[in-house]
Image (tube, coloured by chain):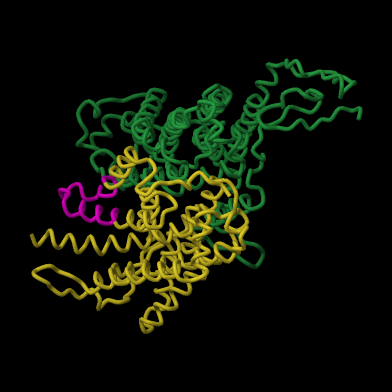
Chain colours: A yellow, B green
Amino acid sequence: MTSVLQTIVDALSFGSMSALAALGIALVFGVMRLINFAHAELIMLGAYGTLVLAGAPWPIVVICVVAFVALIAVGMERVAFRPVRGASMATLLVTSFAVSYFLQNLVILFEGAQVKTLSFGVSLLDPFRVIDVRITWLDLVTVVATLAMLGAVAAILTRTRTGVQLRAATENFRMARMVGVRANRVIAVAFAMSGALAATVSLLLVAQNGTVSPAMGLQPALIGFVATVIGGMGSLIGAVTGGFALGVITVVFQASLPVGLTPYTDAFVFAIVIGFLVLRPNGLFGARLTEERA
Amino acid sequence: MSASGETAVRSPVKVEREAHPLLRASWTPAVLVAGLLLIALFGASSSAVLQQVVTTGFVYLVVVVGLYTFVGLSGVVSFGHISFMGIGAYACALVAIPATMKGVLLPTLPGWLQSIELGLFASVAVGAVCALVFAAAIAWPIMRISGLAAAITLFAVLIVVNTIGTNWDPVTRGTRTMLGVPIETTLWVAFGFGVVAVLVAWVFQSSAAGLRLKMTREDEFGARSLGVSVARARIWGFLLSAVIIGIGGALYAHLQGSFTPADFYLRTTFLTIVMLVVGGMHSLSGAVIGTMVITGLQQLLNEVQDGISLGVVTISSRPGITQVALAVVLLLILVFRSEGITGGREIPLPRRWRSGNGGQPAAGADTPASKPPAA
């Protein structure tokens, strides 16, 4: 019973983080029909930002890292993605892959490929016990931060003028432009929000693992990519649900697989994803937008 | 020849010579093979180092042509195809490494696999078949979903295959190097396979199945409305590309002799994508030219990475320079010439062999550049 509860706690924590990664990817996908592979590098750069600022008071670190990553995300859109906006799906995908590869190797060039350790939010790893279940403060912070970020994104999307424009652009980009939505602005806002979400993921990851490495963004981002597929491409709620579900499934597999098979957790999770796609090729929440080209 | 070739209304002056249909049909592959032959001859007459570079280039050519038969023709980007290369290489190694060595390297292999010892062609065939079987197992679910979703799912496949490769110690030696594959991919072996790959890809893209696949790329809904099953068209291209890339992987095993799962992961995925896109991913000529150009460029960059001195400034060896430079090249191509060096066209017939007007464009999407002399 205890181990089941323990798994639930772990699943909630990891599922939340995956949902954040998925939402960041889905926001950009929504407006640009672009799967941003470089989201992995946004997460990674956030972690390196934390490394640089290590030692500063935590509110300063949080604010600076979020601003830094959001800025990188907006800059990335301006330099690399704007010139290819409206190009074929293949061009967009390859471009984002190239940006991702560029940033990762740039970090390797300057910081080296090795794993570095840092201490950020170490005190959050202190556990407390509730009926024999070991909960760290970080688990709590992860869930609360996720709910706060989801709430903030929801509020922006429903309560602000820009947010409404962003949703309109997600529904039908061309139509939105015709009625006066400024494309550049809406896309920049989507990238900035995506960057802030990526920064949140990197702060949580750094607090959890205490390490940074150039390839660290891949795993959470991959879960985010796949989550957008299972959620139904173009659906924000689908992506969040998909991300959370994938995180939960991963933790459940990790806890229940025989010891010899735990390294293959990802393989099992993605085998399930592929099996799921046989049953529902359009994902959980349909995909009426996937074929559209700007 | 097409009946409309001599529309006397618009062009009273007849073009003197028209290319024979056979020449038209075989022009592009003939030029490509001739070009490859020149490169091979250049390699054969160079230093051992350059010869190795050219041989490696031909092995990548097999892989990139394989990638082209799916990505180029279907328009669906795949970041997962290098998993077929890895499967081809490991399957080939398991049957090609001498039995005595296998006993030491992989003591827990089952007996029949332990004793088997195949030559170059048989072991390459095993690599190809294993890649095909794996591709066939995942083809149906992945080819049914939209192109974007397929691209992501294939990326997940790459990561899963890599995870399995790095953990399945009894068969792959995990992250430790697999070694002892007889080095049998010589320059001319690699050249031969490269030529065969180019010819197979050409025949496929000219066949009904290949044209259907191109059609789904150009206009998915149009293709559907003409009764083409998008999923089925993609599956054929997918399986063919898996076979070709599996062969490429097996050749790689026989080229290097030793390798690890990291050889078949993101770096190689990126390199082959760069080769395909820089050349122009929508034409076979693009795949071939891109591979050759990037092979040359990479060799130059590697020399820079090893450290050169420019007068007073010495650029010391820095890991990552090659990768960053390749990424920049790819981004520049994407932004300024997204159809690649070839512009997505095949090598056109020489102008004087093209018909005056109304005839078929030389090959693929080439627009007839020659205007009738009389206005």
User: Quarter of the image holding residue B353?
Assistant: top right
Question: What type of secondary structure mainly makes up the magenta span?
Answer: helix
Residue appearing at x 45%, y 66% in the figure: A157
Residue A15: x percent and y percent?
A: 28, 60
Residue appearing at x 51%, y 63% in the figure: A166
Q: Nearer the viewer, residue B186 or B142?
A: B142
Residue A142: x percent and y percent?
A: 29, 69
Q: Nearer the viewer, residue B122 or A60?
A: A60
Q: In screen coordinates, is B257 left or right of B71?
A: left
Is residue B306 in view from this perspective? no
Is residue A27 in view from this perspective? yes
Taking the view exactly as shown, the residue that stands out farthest to the front is: A179
Taking the view exactly as shown, the residue that stands out farthest to the right is: B374
Q: How many marks?
A: 0
As drawn, B105 above or below A163: above
In which quadrant will I find the N terminus of chain A? bottom left
User: Quarter of the image holding residue B108?
Assistant: top left
Residue appearing at x 46%, y 62% in the figure: A108
Whether residue A248 is in magenta: the answer is yes
Q: In screen coordinates, is A136 left or right of A159?
A: left
Magenta segment:
A245-268
User: Quarter of the image holding residue B99?
Assistant: top left
Residue A241: x percent and y percent?
A: 32, 56
Residue A120: x percent and y percent?
A: 32, 76
Whether residue B173 is in magenta: the answer is no
Residue appearing at x 70%, y 32% in the figure: B366
